Amino acid sequence: MSIKEFYSQLSNKSLNISLYFLCIGVLTTVIVILNNSWVVIGIIFILISILYYSLHLYYVKRAKVEIPINNEYEDYRGNRFLIESTDYHIYFFSPKGTVLDEVKIRSRLTSTQYILISNGQEIGHAELNIIGRPVLKIYGRYKWECHLQSRLGRIGELRDGNGTKINVLKNKNGDWIIEKNEKLLASIKKGWLERNWINLFRLNTPVLFFYEKINEAERTALLFFISAFYEK
């Protein structure tokens, strides 16, 4: 999927919400007029409809953006990701506007399931319990256990069965700092884009950077952890 298709999804969603509130607004207005009541409630729904229609037009415009023909997929693979999301999907885009990895989200009664897809293939899945202390367990090709730690400056940690430990911290600017063996492994920054990315992505799009060489197991675990705990 490309960033253009992503914006088309958002455009259609905004249009559907706009039509929903428009119908409610019109029906409410008719009912209150027939009952000689105030029409303020109906007007509020119509204004909300106009707001979402404006979002629809915005995303229609973004969906028409031209994507460069030369795709530098290999240059950016595992190095820089731009994080976007819709309902039940987390997308990790390359700076060229192509989805490199996708995480599908499924809600269950006592847990939330995450499925990582890369190059059209399922890499693994993870499950986050929503009762009690949050613990994310990753299954499949790579097995990890991730704990959320709500302490000042600390978000959580990831551990595998071989003793590998990755710490996820938060600095005073709200950026995520990801460390392994006390060395900077990766970070997530929000509100920062390179100039040549602005044409494709929204200004507030979070950017994931990998600074150290990372293996596939660690990369997979971090993508799951980010999908489960990062709040855009």
Image (cartoon, rainbow, N blue to C red):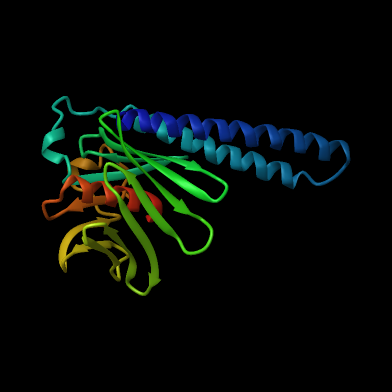
| Residue 146 point in image, percent of width and height | 35, 58
Q: Residue at x 29, y 28 (%)?
A: 120
Looking at the image, which residue is at 52% across and 63% down?
132
Viewer-nearest residue: 71 or 39 = 71
As drawn, 92 above or below 147: above
Residue lying farthest to the top in this orientation: 69
From the viewer's perspective, tell me whether residue 213 is left or right of residue 115: left
| Camera sees residue 231 | no
Farthest residue toward the bottom? 152
Residue 182 pos. (x, y %): 16, 69
- Determine whether 8 is above or below 214 in the image: above
Residue furthest to the front in view is 161
**Can residue 219 be seen from the camera position used here?**
yes
User: Residue at horizontal 13%, vertical 55%?
Assistant: 211
Q: Position of residue 216 (x, y in %)?
A: 19, 45
Q: Is residue 13 above or below residue 38?
A: above
